[in-house]
Amino acid sequence: MTDLVNLLPNVNVSRETEALLREFAALILKWTQKINLISAASEDEIWQRHILDSVQVYTALPQDFQWKTWADFGSGGGLPGIIIAVLARETGGQVVMVESDQRKATFLRTAVRSLGLTNARVESKRIEALPALSADVISARALAALDMLCAFAAPHLQTGGICLFPKGRRAGAEIQQARSLWTFDLTEIPSQSGDGTILRLEGLRHV
């Protein structure tokens, strides 16, 4: 059994939340045999590589930041979208997961239903086809380069909103490229689960 208290030392994980996270991890492992939700090589490290990574996105927000709508683009296997919805069940915030792959969207809806997440919904459309979401927070994990993520996010981000984008070793090059097209205030938050970083963007606007 995974020790969530040690794995997630900065998160208040209730017994109910822990049970939901375990149920979700089991769902991922079951469904990934049919569709590619996570790589086979990372199945044994699902908690460290995927669950913790997703929790870190949630905790990357400033503690005093109030949000009503969180949009997760390219949600895929619900990482981080479903995790965020589980952790935010009692905050009153709504999580919108955007996933154009119909099979993955079906998985997400199954997870939402199975876990009883009344604060989450799935949009099975391309990001460009969505009406403006007016999201307070936008996240995306392993979806696109930073300049493209900024282009995806800008039409859907509420004034004063925040973007949270986990990135790997190429983060520096992506930041430099994005700054040629976009201006933003940047905070880099080192990952606890590897050598990556979470990029927190505020004040996003086109040059």
Image (spheres, rainbow, N blue to C red):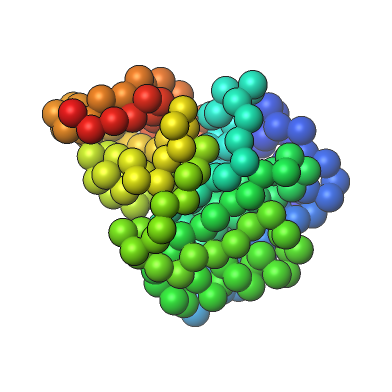
Q: Left or right: 66 with respect to 154?
A: right
Residue closer to the observer: 2 or 202: 202
Q: Left or right: 186 with respect to 117?
A: left
Is residue 49 among the parts visible in the rendering? no
Establish if 1 lies above or below 167.
below
Establish if 177 lies above or below 62.
below
Q: Left or right: 143 with respect to 17?
A: left
Quarter of the figure with residue 54 = top right
Q: Left or right: 150 with respect to 194?
A: left
Establish if 148 lies above or below 129.
above
The image position of residue 12, as x and y in percent, is 76, 33
Give the number of callouts. Answer: 0
> What is the residue that sits farthest to the right in this orientation?
15
Is residue 147 among the parts visible in the rendering? yes
Residue closer to the observer: 76 or 163: 163
Residue drawn at x 63%, y 49% as measured from the top left? 94
The image position of residue 198, as x and y in percent, is 43, 31
Quarter of the figure with residue 24 = bottom right
Residue drawn at x 60%, y 70% as measured from the top left? 109
Residue drawn at x 44%, y 64% as measured from the top left? 99
Residue closer to the observer: 15 or 195: 15
Residue drawn at x 45%, y 24% as measured from the top left? 189
The image position of residue 188, as x and y in percent, is 40, 22
The image position of residue 146, as x and y in percent, is 27, 39
Position of the C terminus by quadrant: top left
Residue closer to the observer: 194 or 125: 125
